[in-house]
Amino acid sequence: MLLLVIISIPLLLAIVAGLINKTRLVSSLIVLGYLIGLVLSIALAYHFLASPQPISLFNIFYADALSIFFVFTSSIIVFAAALYSKGFIELGLETGQLSQRQAKVYFILFNIFIFSILLVTIVSNLGLMWVAIEITTLVSAFLVGFYNNKNAIEAAWKYLIICSVGIILALLGTILFSYALLFSTGIRSLDWNDFITVAHQLDPNIIKVAFIFILVGYGTKAGLAPMHTWLPDAHSQAISPISALLSGVLLKTSLYAILRYSLIINLCIGKSFSSHLFIFFGLLSLLVAAGLILVQKDIKRLLAYSSIEHVGIILFGFGVGGKIGLYGALLHIFNHAVTKSLLFFGAGNLVEVFASHRLEKIRGCLRVLPFTGSMVLLGIFALAGFPPFSIFFSEFTILIAAFTGGYAIWGSLLLLLIIITFGAILFHFSNVLLGEKPENLKVSPEPWSIKLAFIFLLFFVIFGGMALPGLFDGLFRSIIGVFGAS
Amino acid sequence: METFLVLGLLGSTFAMVFSKRISALIGNFALQSFFLCLFSFMEALKGNHLGLYLISGLILVLKVILIPQIIRYVAVNIKSDENLGFFISPQLSLVCALVLTYLAWLLASTVFMGQPILIRIFGATAFSMVSLGIFLMIFRIIALAQVIGLLAMENGIFLLASAVSGGMPFIVEMAIFFDIFVGVVILGIFIFRINKLFVGIDVSKLNSLKG
């Protein structure tokens, strides 16, 4: 039941946003709605840990530990994005950058987008999961092209076309999976549980081809290199709260889909096939991202490339596998989501004030916007992987898994690439944060809801590294059980 | 009958690759969808299942009539140049199409090893439709051709689904139809926006975001 309430909150809020014309009221209701959603998702997680049985409803919804972890992570980012949106949109209305109508459209699309994201993680039918992922693309394309200028429309078009091609390849993979099931067992189904029950009987050759289509298809949406080309455009041009959702949550939902399929193929032909592919694509993404972060000139594109890097690290962690590798990768999903959202919020504020995306024009942020500046400062150290912030610990865990699990060479390469991006990010942001304050800059202080969103996320960025709540530990252990790691 | 359908599907796909004008491309796409509709109608006759009849009806309404109409409407309203714009000439494209179809046959022979020849042939036709859809998207300049390439890929996938795995569950099939329809409408909206901002729908002009 909790699951149904959680998934219906965004739908209700979308209707509210459509019916009520007072933006302030709507944005406050949305914040309240997602606060309730967050509390309920925590309750759901505790409920699951108390009796660790997968939840199954009407043969459509299915939630095991993996789903619940993704719902929980999404709920946190979504609540922060709702808080930030409130301040961001109200500020846009005050300064005349946005019209009432745009604000209304924004809030409707925002909620439908979140509905589709949550839907991906809780459906049991792999065909419906595909449909939900396609809906995320269709809805968010409008949010990417929200400003309706040349750059935004170009980004939205590339996003739509490249991700649609990717997702069609994923559909091809889905059909091949269903063919394998029909061919080997005579069952006609797209239900994930049916696949898992008979996974060992499936024809390995078909499953291998099918999985490659799935990895390339959903990998396009997850931002894996070399299918990542839409990502920096879309993430940099989208309206800032949406950039945070795209990086923090949307990429992870595609990863979630890949993980679901990897569970089937691992049972069918063993772990080495998916694990090698994961390590290859993970490192390739890191390599591409590291190179482009070094020469980056645009603040939001820099953060977007850093998302490609972190998706690469996560995939590498899953590729290395084992208890430690999985633990690190799962933790990294959460840590990257909170840290990157915080930074996209920060970058959003900076871009508004400096009216430019270009790194060389954004200077002296700690003096111009002390609050946002200090948040970005902490966020950057966290993102680069400084202790004691949370990302350091998850990266460290993945590295330990690589070195102890027989992947020492690839682990060293990972470490090298992490160090390169570490240096590049600190270099770029030292200029942004320090430096002389430009003259004649009109600065309005951040609204309280934006500040609250920062503080909320910062809490996880800092304390996620120092102490891990029992909730995480329980969920992770359950997920590792699902993966059957030893 | 099967031979006729395979020839029709492949022929219309090749005709799409060879098309020089938008109207021809749209017409050939409608033709391809029509053969797909015939195919799914035959499957429905064999299976005698209401859902299958409904699906072939939906293909007829959506893909043969409605979606080509929408695309024509967009093309007329933005007063687009009839010329598709080629990165690769139609003749060379046809050679590429033949090579891709052969590769599709190789892939289908591997994946559907041990299956009746008919399934392998339909599998190969489906793979070839998918790969030629991608080909159209990459090597034609105007944005409308990308939309049609995408739809051709989807047609290929439908063929694969009904030929080799006996179709997908009904609710999933419906949801996918809905998704495709909404997708086309949204792409249409974006084409209008591109046309307005970039004066034309030449996608090679969409090149300011780099690095």
Image: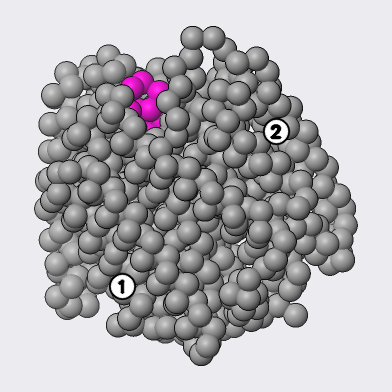
The colour scheme used here is one colour
Q: Are marks 2 and 1 on the same chain?
A: yes
Among all residues in the image, which is located at the extreme top? A440
Q: Quadrant of residue B190?
A: top left
Label 1 crowd (10 A; few <14 / some 14-19 / many >=20): few
Q: Is residue B6 left or right of residue A466?
A: left
Q: Specify the segment rendered in magenta.
A: A147-157
Q: Looking at the picture, how far across and down is residue A390, in whole percent?
A: 69, 55
Image height of B106 relative to B78, above or below: below
The magenta stretch spans residue A167: no
Q: Main secondary structure of the magenta part?
A: helix
Q: Looking at the picture, how far across and down is residue A421, in whole percent?
A: 73, 37
Say which residue label 2 marks.
Answer: A425
Query: Which amino acid does the dot numbered 1 rest on?
Result: Val
Image height of A484 relative to B97, above or below: below
Q: Looking at the picture, how far across and down is residue A300, in whole percent?
A: 54, 31
The magenta stretch spans residue A150: yes
Q: Is the C terminus of chain A in the top left, top right, bottom left or bottom right quadrant?
A: bottom right
Query: Which amino acid does the dot numbered 2 rest on?
Result: Ile
Image mark for residue A5 = 1
Image height of A35 relative to B200, above or below: below
Residue at 47% in and 83% down? A47
Residues at marks 2 and 1, CA–CA distance in whole angstroms: 41 Å
Dot 1: element = helix
Q: Looking at the picture, how far across and down is residue A8, in whole percent?
A: 28, 67
